[in-house]
Amino acid sequence: MLGKLLPLLLGLIGLAGGGAVGYFLRPAPPPAEHLTDPAGAEGAAEGDHGAAPEAHGAPAAADHGAEGDVTSEFVKLNNQFIVPLVTESRISGMVILSLSLEVKVGETETVYRAEPKLRDAFLQVLFDHANTGGFQGLFTDSANMSRLRRALTETARSILGPGVLAVLVSDIVRQDS
């Protein structure tokens, strides 16, 4: 009989121990003022669908003036740019870049509508930069990166107009083969 009760008893002890640990290690409840905030309570109850767009490449606000008004937005282009490095008619490596555009408020949709044309023009600038040796040696040198950003910004302005304030290189990696 003890052989049948021992596994049951050990299971109950494990269950009680796990419950006690879970009780003592649970997260702290939210502050009381958060629960009385109507926007916070509704957002939490509805799953807060408004917080997810940034994960999908939506713009982030920047450049808050003294009054708190927003003058520009950042628009992250959805895919990375892959640039092959060619040496003596052979691919010797590649550079992978992620780019974002700083645009005036309200220009985000314009960027997304023109993204295919923008990507094509950016790739041409990146290929030209690679062909002139811009990604060789100290490719992250300040003068070299400034020249690349300036060329990308001029290209973006030629397509989208003066609403483009700057092109930002958010990630850059070179892989040599």
Image (cartoon, rainbow, N blue to C red):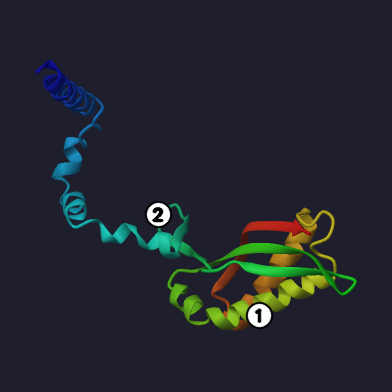
How far from the left and from the top, in percent, is residue 32? 16, 36
Q: CA distance from mark 1 to mark 2?
A: 35 Å
Give the x, y percent position of residue 103: 52, 69
Residue at the image position 58 percent from the left and 68 percent from the top: 165
Amino acid type, mark 2: Gly
Sequence-wise first label, 1 or 2: 2
- In the picture provided, is 95 more to the left or to the right than 35? right
- Kind of element beneath mark 2: loop
Q: Is residue 1 left or right of residue 72?
A: left
Q: Quadrant of the N terminus?
A: top left
Q: Please report the residue visible at 79 percent of the width from the left and 62 percent of the height from the top.
A: 135
The secondary element bearing badge 1 is classed as helix
Q: Quadrant of the C terminus?
A: bottom right
- The type of residue carrying mark 1 is Ala
Please give the label number shown on residue 78: none
Q: Nearer the viewer, residue 86 or 18?
A: 18
- Residue at position x 40%, y 54% in the image: 67
Disc 2 target residue: 68
* Dot 1 crowding, Cα within 10 Å, few <14, some 14–19, many 20+: some
Where is mark 1, residue-wise? Answer: 121
Circles 1 and 2 in contact, beta carbons < 8 Å:
no
| Closer to the camera in the image, 5 or 88 | 5
Give the percent coordinates (x, y) of residue 110.
Answer: 48, 79
**On the image, which quarter does residue 131 sit in?**
bottom right
In the depicted structure, whether residue 120 falls above or below residue 144: below
